[in-house]
Amino acid sequence: MYIYLAKKNCLACDQQERYLWAMGLPYERIDVDERPELAEGRQLPAVLRQGVVLVEGAFSEEDLARALGRG
């Protein structure tokens, strides 16, 4: 399971979330507006797995694929 950290009303967050959906990744979206402690020291949006940041900030679908070993 992947964790997707995002903010509400964030167009980039919504766009990049589509990449996860399109790749068929099982993930849980966490809005950092409700859990701000999770955003400390991170660029948003961010994808994590087992507590490790795979991609963060402005990432492309290709960046995500490379981070997952698919590209």
Image (cartoon, grey):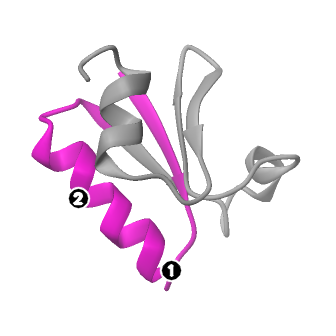
Q: Residue 45, percent across and down?
A: 56, 56
In the displayed structure, would residue 23 be above or below residue 71? below
Work out how far the residue at label 1 is from the one at label 2, CA to CA, in angstroms.
13 Å
| Mark nearer the N terminus (1 vs 2) | 1
Start-end of magenta stretch = 1-27
How many neighbours does mark 2 have within 10 angstroms: few (below 14), some (14-19), or many (20 or more)? few
Q: Secondary structure at mark 2?
A: helix
Amino acid type of the residue that numbered disc 2 sits on in the rendered structure: Arg
According to the picture, the residue beneath numbered tag 1 turns out to be 10
Judged left or right of residue 29, residue 40 is right
Number of numbered discs on residues: 2
Magenta stretch containing residue 53, yes or no?
no
Q: Residue 65, percent across and down?
A: 30, 30
According to the picture, the residue beneath numbered tag 2 turns out to be 18
Amino acid type of the residue that numbered disc 1 sits on in the rendered structure: Cys
Q: Residue 4, percent across and down?
A: 47, 44
